[in-house]
Image (cartoon, rainbow, N blue to C red):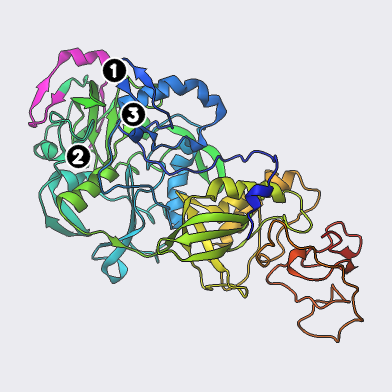
Amino acid sequence: MGSVVSRISATPKPSFSPYTASSSLEVGECTLTCGRETLHPGIEVTEVMRRTVSRLVRPELVALRPALLLLLVLTLLLPSPLLVQAAPTGHDAFLDTWARSDLPVAQGRVSRTWMWGPEPFTTPLREPYAEAPGGFRLVQYFDKSRMEITNPLTDRSSPWYVTNGLLARELITGQLQLGDATFQAVPPAQVNVAGDPDDPNAPTYANFAHLLAAAPLPVGSVVTQTLDNAGIVRDDPGLARYAVTAAVLVPETNHSVASVFWGFMNARGLVYTGWRFREDTLFPNPFYATGFPITEPYWVRVRVAGTPRDVLVQCFERRCLTYTPENPPGWQVEAGNIGQHYYRWRYEQLGRTPQQAGVYELATVTNVVDGDTIDVEFRDGRTARVRLIGVDTPEVYGEVECFGVAASQFTAEWLNRKQVALERDVSETDRYGRLLRYVWIGPYLFNELLVREGYAGVTTYPPDVKYAWRFREAERVAREERAGLWGVCPSSPVGGGQEPLPEPPLSPTPLPTLTPSPSPEPSPTCDPSYPTVCIPPPPPDLDCSDIPYRRFPVLPPDPHRFDPDRDGIGCEVG
């Protein structure tokens, strides 16, 4: 079979750039793609630094490239051997949680730290938790934290439907949490809190254990205390030059929060909710993402890409925040890579075995048929054609419809030759043997992305309706914003049903023009819109390449859209 990729000409540029798997690098989580080039005397960009998220950086940010490149070098944290590559998300609640804070970062609309990271670095996993149904809960690890759904039957609208665990407390205390009040005592994490993972002078989470009960700094006092890798606290008056103070005392844990962190925890900025970008507080409340402070703030001297730097570190229940004065504005306060650190502790230091949740199957896209149909190869060598559930893109075979080529190009740029996750709903295949699947790539549900960006309309056929409500909302916003085809096409070419049979070869043998025989006997399998030929009604949606008839009469409502110019004659070309 042929590929639509070779048939694509110049089309409107997608508003999202194609996705490329990546991982964030710390301390200074601003990430971007770069070749081998010298950023500073004696510092060279390595292959590890290429694992980034430049796919969504907007053109106006290109001017910042030198500063961002230098920041990358200042903030490198090599991934663990177990953290081999990015993985698709696989749960829409995880997607929504990620998108609120991090989609604006991913698109380059804001310059600030990731709160989760560019995408997960594990597939969805099952971890034991006493209060979860069946004793296991769904989790997924991001660079910056771990997302969890403990009880999937609770209120989806609650900000606590997805939680992110008391990871910092577990790492510091060595109390592995297995339930609301169930803990297992294990060795604390011998993992560096900040800086290069192989820096022998950097403090580990275990070094913070004896500081949990330290007296709070007086509110208003300048933070000049330091911590070394032996857990010894000293004072360096020279650090007063950074003018960081103790901003507020939190009575729940009797610790003060550093002014730079308190400002970040109460900040407003661009977020993504309800399928729209808007200004709002970054977090529902100041402690939502971090939890309460469990240590005081301490200055540490750590190597970052081999270069010693002053970094302020403060650990909260859920995360540890860092402040690096030498970073560019927007990236001075960052969330540490505690998701990576915790995973390394739990599955390497403690020797636990990850348990796959089995919510999807990974495959590589080998061919893009059109906007909503792809060919894939699974890891075991199986191949299949996949029809994306719940969406309908304009046709590119037979009568090429408005925005059809653009939709196919969008899908090709995002998916072709990429690893994706295929999630099943209820049906395994359609009547033509094509797999019916939701397609995840990185943190994105691609079916939904097609609709939100205006490359597809919604088409729903029970029982495969798991995400139908999401797709309808995404289409509503796309229509209101006149995104994609909704701002270009004079009439909607989409929304009529599931996709046609596999497309013809690129150079098909021309079919003869057939003279219709007298009208067939009425049949429940023949759609009345085509009175002189027998064509079944949808689903699935057919196009001219799927039928042998040409130039036949068409009556409204023409559910297969064989007559796009509405002259009463179907399949006039080909």
Disc 3 packing (10 Å; few <14; some 14–19; many ≥20):
many
Quadrant of residue 536 in the image?
Answer: bottom right
The residue pinned by badge 1 equals 42
Asked if residue 213 can be seen in this view, the reply is no
Q: Distance from label 3 to label 2 (Cα)?
A: 18 Å
Q: Position of residue 338 (x, y in %)?
A: 27, 42
The residue under label 1 is which amino acid type?
Gly
Span colored in magenta: 226-251
Residue drawn 68% across and 39% down?
A: 12
The residue under label 2 is which amino acid type?
Ile
Note whether 450 is above or below 431 in the view shown: above
Nearer the observer: mark 1 or 2; the answer is: 1
Q: Position of residue 412 (x, y in %)?
A: 59, 49
Asked if residue 161 can be seen in this view, the reply is yes
Q: Quadrant of the N terminus?
A: bottom right
Q: Distance from label 1 to label 2 (Cα)?
A: 39 Å
Q: Quadrant of the C terminus?
A: bottom right
Q: Position of residue 145 (x, y in %)?
A: 31, 45
Q: Nearer the viewer, residue 262 or 468?
A: 468
Residue drawn 91% across and 60% down?
A: 567
Q: Earlier in the sequence, mark 1 or mark 2?
A: 1
The residue pinned by badge 3 equals 333
Nearer the observer: mark 3 or 2; the answer is: 3
Q: Nearer the viewer, residue 252 or 182?
A: 182
538 lies left or right of 311: right
The residue pinned by badge 2 equals 294
Nearer the observer: mark 1 or 3; the answer is: 1
CB-based contact (under 8 Å), mark 1 and mark 2:
no
Q: Position of residue 162 (x, y in %)?
A: 38, 54
Q: Distance from label 1 to label 3 (Cα)?
A: 27 Å
